[in-house]
């Protein structure tokens, strides 16, 4: 990721884990265009009610919980119950009231619209 961008994962944390479940940073792709930032986060096996997103003091936190899959006797497993956590610093140009999230096929789509004053616009020139 380009270090010049304000939208960047935050790696340091002051929280201490109190659970024995694995905590995983989901892989993400971050895109930018004239209107918005888009964050795509891989959250396989997480139901929509298992995702918590919070925006506060210029930071967007993503927490998600994946439970064990099917019921019955486990005879082999590589997918374990886990918690996902990721924290992003968000540029001031984002309209925090319009942030939208959608979970589709195990991928979280976070849309962070830019405030209209931060968007580039074309100025038309009028003739006399």
Image: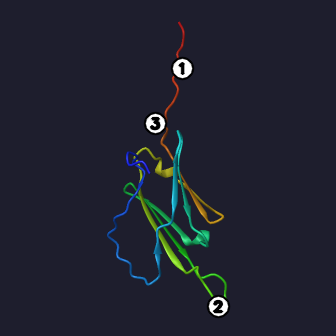
Q: Secondary structure at mark 1?
A: loop
Q: Secondary structure at mark 3?
A: helix
Sequence order check: which comes first, mark 1 or mark 3? 3
Q: Nearer the viewer, residue 97 or 6?
A: 6
Residue at 43% over, 44% down: 93
Q: Nearer the viewer, residue 14 or 25?
A: 25
Residue at 55% over, 81% down: 80
Q: Residue furthest left?
A: 14
29 lies left or right of 105: left
Q: Nearer the viewer, residue 73 or 120?
A: 73
Label 1 to label 3: alpha-carbon separation: 17 Å
Label 1 to label 2: alpha-carbon separation: 68 Å
Sort mark 2 into few (<14), some (14-19) or many (20+) by Cα contacts within 10 Å. Answer: few
Rendered location of residue 46, percent (x, y): 59, 72
- What residue did someone put label 2 on? 75
Sequence order check: which comes first, mark 3 or mark 2? 2
Sequence order check: which comes first, mark 1 or mark 2? 2
Vertical placement of residue 22 versus 54, above or below:
below
Q: Residue furthest top?
A: 128
- What residue did someone put label 1 on? 124
Vertical placement of residue 45 versus 42, above or below:
below
Label 3 to label 2: alpha-carbon separation: 57 Å
Within the image, what quadrant is residue 109 found in?
bottom right
Q: Secondary structure at mark 2?
A: loop
- Mark identifier at residue 117: 3
């Amino acid at each position: 990721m380009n270090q010049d961008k304000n939208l960047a994962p935050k790696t340091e944390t002051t929280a201490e884990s109190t659970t024995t479940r694995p905590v995983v940073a989901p892989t993400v792709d971050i895109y930018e265009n004239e209107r918005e930032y888009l964050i795509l986060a891989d959250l396989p096996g997480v139901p929509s009610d298992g995702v918590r997103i919070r925006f506060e003091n210029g930071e967007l936190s993503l927490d998600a919980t994946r439970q064990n899959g099917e019921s019955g006797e486990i005879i082999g497993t590589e997918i374990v119950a886990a918690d996902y956590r990721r924290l992003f610093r968000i540029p001031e140009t984002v309209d925090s009231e319009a942030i939208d999230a959608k979970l589709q096929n195990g991928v979280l789509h976070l849309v962070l619209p830019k405030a209209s004053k931060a968007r580039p616009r074309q100025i038309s020139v009028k003739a006399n």
